[in-house]
Every structure is written in structure tokens, then in C-alpha cells.
Amino acid sequence: MSTQIDLEELTKIEGHATLRLRVDDGRVEHLEIRSLEGSRYFEGILRGRLYSEASEIATRICGICSCAHCLAAHQAIENALGIVPSAQTHELRRLLNLGESIRSHAAHLYFLALPDYLGVPSTLSIALEQRGAVERAIQLMKLGNDMVRLLAGRDIHPVSVTVGGHLKIPTQEQLTGIRERLEQLRPAAVATAELFNSLPYPELHVKLERFSLYSDSEYALIAGSIRSDEHEFEQRDYGKFVSEYHSPEQTANFVVREGHAYMVGALSRLANSKELLSSDAAALLRAGPVPQGLDNPFLINPAQAIELVQNFDDALAILSNLRPEPEPPPEIWVQAGHGIAAVEAPRGVLWHEYELDDTGHILHANIITPTAQNLRAMEESLAALLPEVVHEGKEAVVAAAEKLIRAYDPCLSCAVHFLNVEWL
Amino acid sequence: MSERQIAVAKKLRVGFYGITGCAGCLESVIFNEDEIVGIFNLVDVQAFPFIKGANSHEDLDVAFMEGLVASPRDLETLKEVRKNARVLVALGTCANTGCIPAYRHYTPLENYEHLIKEKEDDIKDVPPSPIDTHVPVDFAIPGCPPNGKEILEVIKAVAAGKTPRPYTAPVCIECRRKGNYCLLELGKPCLGPITRGGCGAVCPSGGFECWGCRGQTEDANLPAFIELLEQKGFSWDFIKRRLRTFVGQKTPDLEPLRRALEVEKV
Ligand code: SF4
Ligand code: SF4
Ligand code: SF4
């Protein structure tokens, strides 16, 4: 007997998607995630524009991770033009990336994921009962936003980052202000990690290769090689690393590696860079479910919460050394070139690639977002999970699927606002 | 009915929706960190699928719509929300002009041909278009993203039964007020003089030239401005691309303007 019911909307994700399911005789016969977001063809729109315009256009791919797009675009263009930014620029950019990670993890954990574990429709709707949690979420989000506002010129779609440098260097006083607030709010980040360490996560095992940026010197976010437990690549070898395919049900492309799904994001970063964690983040990691469950995608949530503490510690370390000097962006010698860069967006590795002609105009652009890479991993994770719950009926299936998809924190408008569950 | 119930019954029913876009406009609502809980108390938020589990689009006083129409599904959602809302607010540049995605109208097909894939009917491409191409819009909040405080002002005004007043002065006014160094004078292609302000001149304040995301002021003297940019060494192609990036098809027809300029020169 084949089941077919009306659509359910999956909410609290970014973007629009449908989960198509066919269940025959209590077995999941067909399963696919379908992204419904209209196509925007950014890579085509970028063609013919000047190298210096790439970021302003590409950030509009995603408001949630516009800083990651801005950094990836600038770094890829710098690679194409042979520019190596200063150490100060690198630190300012890391700080910007950390601000985006803090706000994104805080918003995702408290507003999108937590309601699933509390069994309520929305964290804001329980504002009165959960004052503490909401207060904490908003304070964390605000601090991350203020870091972005200071370093990027505004909270969404950065304006102060430029090719080779920074258009507006923050003052020592402004940076001290941020440092003090980081110190003040650090207990809230720790409390978040403790809370997410303590939630009851469903048991699930999915064999997926986990990729992230990796560097020996820092918890890698904006520079490094690409690593999994089995492989290591240089960024410039990305053509060997990813391949894309398309299905007519999708506006998003699927990205695979040698035909296999792989995972990017917080769990991958923790798996590959755990030796680089601060002592408190490492202790929180050991105290929770993550080390025993690196193959359980539900544990992306506690992994993000541990990263939140790591983000605080990295930002504090940067701020204890940074003494910003005025530094005008370098003179640019326009030339033909080809540049590739990867940056860790909150949801995982983001790729930008540009080819420039000798007048600095973009001949070719390619952008691969974290969600596009995780789509196949999400499908395979659902395929592993749903047979376990399918006998509990449709409501249970929908709840479990939503929870799992939300754990991945997909940002489907980038990959191509609701997820419908379509029973075929 | 107790007093409290009456007060509750009077709350405005408000919905926040998104079609094809980047979610930056919806984030701008939430990024009013100090006021967001208050807003959720001031009005009755019927829908905000980005952060709310249960969402309705029935019987709305005000609907905010982010994004542009890029697929038949977008159009369906837009029409559904329009049908159920007393006031429809176009939130952000995508909703108002089609923003960067609609720049596709100015690029040759060969630029993105390699990206076009076969798709099922409900997700097929339609020409990227702002929402007022398809349904009547009652109020526009420009900006990519819009200023978060401006969104709050609109919500508060509607909650108080007032019509919010759009900002009409150019970006330069706010920029000068902030004591910024003028980027145009430094030779950057800043569109501040012809662009509607209200954003607090956020780009020039961050060291970056204004790209005109809030659209042109009503009295913008485009021919004079184009001439100025040309004098500063920018090519006509560059100027055309820059003027159209955010305002797209709502940019006045540039070619005749340019021809008039040429004639003057002869
Ligand atoms: S107007 Fe800008 S911020 Fe808003 S959805 Fe469109 S691209 Fe994003
Ligand atoms: S920087 Fe731009 S917005 Fe500011 S005054 Fe100069 S032209 Fe106007
Ligand atoms: S300065 Fe110009 S581009 Fe920047 S937000 Fe204001 S209107 Fe938009």
C-alpha cells in the first residue's frame, strides 16, 4: 500500500524546499530533497563585471553568510591578481568571520534547532517561559552582529572589506569595547555549549567523509588546505575535489566527490581540527556526545555550540594582540589571472573561483555553497534515519526529518523558505 | 471580554514572507536585537517561516514580502499573500526592483547559458521581476538590505494606524552629516548624489562608495551625473552597469540620455 498525504511545510530553515517521500508497506521507497528557490544565476551575472565588483554582487547570494561570500570573493580575486594581504588584514578578516559565526550559530541553535528539542513551535513564542534562553540568544546574536558591523561597515552585505585590504580600520577603542563584551558574554557561550551537550539526540550513524579547511597554526576559518580523515587537498586543486550534477526536480546543483556524498560544517571542522581547540572548548567537546558520535549528523548542533566557545576564544586571542595601524589598501596591478579560494561559512566550506581577463573583467565565475555540498549528505542521512521511524506514522516521520534537516542548518536560498514534505 | 482580551484582539495581524531572495531583508527585521521581542509583543506575528514553526497567511493586516519573482511558485505565493493581506509591503530591493538577480536582463544569454538546466514546471524560470510587476503593492521599503530601524518605524507606524513617510533626500545629505570624507571627490564612482537616502549613508561611512541600492531620488539629474562620472574617467559601459545593478529595469532609459549628452557635446 502506498501512502500519499497533503504537504506539510518545513519551516525554520533558510530557503524553500520539499522533501519527497514514498512509503510502501512501511518501507521508504523513494526519498529526495527538492530545493524550490528560484534560480538567480549569479555566476552569469558576474561575467563582464570588474574584479573589484565581484564581492558586492556575490554577497547577495546569501544574507545569512554574506561575510563568508565577501571573504571568499575577495580572496579568490586576490589569488587571481597575485596579491597577498597583510597580517593585519588577515586578522581583521578572521575577526569578521568569527563575528558571523557567533551570530549565525547563536541564531541557529536557539531559534531554529532548540524548539525541536523543547517541543515548541518557536523560541520567540516561548519568550515568557524561557526568558533566560531568549535573552542569551539575543545577546550572543547582537555581539556577533556588532563585530560584523564594526569590521564590515554593516551587519549584512559587508562594505569595508576590499581587494588587498580594509577600507576602514577599527579604532583601538572600538576593538577594546568588543573585547570587553566578549569577556562578559563568554559564560553565555559556555552555557550554550553545556545546554547543547545535555540534549537528548537521536541515535544515527551515517558514513560520510567530513571535509573542512585545515591549518596547523589556527582553528582554520579563512585559510588552509582542505582536509578529511582520509584526504588532504590544496585549495587550487578544487576541480579534482568537487563535481556537480543536476536533476530536473531541483533548482540547486548537487555536489559530490567522486560520486559520493560528503559533509561540511561544524562537525567536520571539529573532527579535523580538534587538536587546535582552546582548552575550554576541548574540555566541553570531551564532556559531550560529539567525540563518540562524529558519524551522527544530529550532533552538528552540539558541535556548533562548542564552536561558539572556540569562536569567543579565537576572537579574544586576536584582540589581545591586535594593535590596528592605518594601512591603505595596496595599489592594484590589473592583469589576467585565475583564482580560487575557500572559506568556512558557518555551514561549511564555501568556494569561489574567478577567471579575469587582462583588463580585470570577470570571464568566468563559479561558486559552490556549503548547502549544495551537504544536500546529498542530508538525503543519505534521511535515508538512514527514516526507516527507523516510519512505523511510528507520518507525524513522527515529518518531525524526525525536520529535526535532522535543521541540524544541518541548510541555507537553501544559497544552494539555489519552507520545506514541504510531499508524500508520493 | 476583559480589558486585556480587548487589547489582544486589537493587535495587528502581521506576516513576514520571502520568495526568491537572500533572506537578508528578513534578517534585518530580526537583527533589531533590542526590539525584536517587543515587536513580537506589539503585533501578532502570524508568519515568519524563517524562525517560526506554525505559520498562517490568513486574514492579515500587513504582509511584508522579501524577494523577487523568479519561478511560477514565487508568483503563486505572492498572489496568495496579496489576496489575504490588507496592506502589502515590498521589503527590500529585490521586491522593489528585482535587485541584482534582475540584472540578468542586461547580460547576454551566453553569460549564463551554461547554468540553465531542465526543470520541472513549478520551478521553471520566469523573467526575474519585482513584485509590483505582478500584484499591487501598498508600501515600499527600499534597500539591499533595508535599514532595520526603518522596518521598525514602518511596523510601528502601521500599528498606530499611520501611513509611514518615505525618505526622499539623497544619500549625500546623511553622508555629509556624518562628516564622511567624500569618496566622489576622491575619484570613486559614488552614486550618493542621485540615490534616495534613509540608510544612514552606511556604505560611504564604511569607506565604500554608494551603489544606489535604494533607487534614484525623484529629482536626480542623471545626465549631469553621468557627465560628471565620465569626466572622472569612468567609461560609459561601467557607468551603465553600475547604475543598473540594483535598480535594474526601474533605471530610466539610459541610452537616449546618453545620446542627448553626445549631441550637446557636438
Ligand atoms: S534585497 Fe538584498 S538583502 Fe533583501 S533579499 Fe534581495 S539581495 Fe537579499
Ligand atoms: S561619499 Fe558619496 S554619498 Fe557621501 S557625500 Fe560623497 S558622493 Fe555623497
Ligand atoms: S549608501 Fe547607497 S548602496 Fe549603500 S545602503 Fe545606502 S543607498 Fe544603498
Image (cartoon, coloured by chain):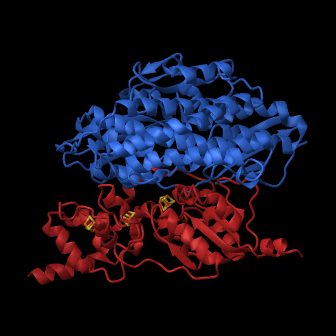
Residue B129 x %, y %: 50, 68
Residue A313, above or below B211? above
Q: Residue furthest left?
A: B266
Which residue is depicted at the point 78% across and 30% down? A200
Q: Quadrant of residue A110?
A: top right
Number of marks in picture:
0
Residue A344 x %, y %: 47, 34
Residue B138 x %, y %: 58, 80
Which residue is depicted at the point 75% across and 32% down? A199
Is A167 on the left or on the right of A103, as rendered?
left
Q: Nearer the viewer, residue B159 or B64?
A: B159
Q: Which chain is red?
A: B
Q: Nearer the viewer, residue A53 or A128?
A: A128
Which residue is depicted at the point 60% across and 71% down? B155
Name the quarter showing ligand 2. Answer: bottom left
Residue A264: in sight, yes or no?
no
Residue A283, above or below A174? above
Q: Nearer the viewer, residue A418 or B26?
A: B26
Is B96 on the left or on the right of A162, as rendered?
right
Q: Which chain is blue?
A: A
Residue A42: in sight, yes or no?
yes
Q: Quadrant of residue A223?
A: top left
Residue B196, above or below B72? below
Q: Nearer the viewer, residue B128 or A159?
A: A159
- For the N terminus of chain A, the quadrant is top right
Residue B105, above or below A242? below
Is A14 on the left or on the right of B52, as rendered?
left
Residue B153 x %, y %: 55, 71
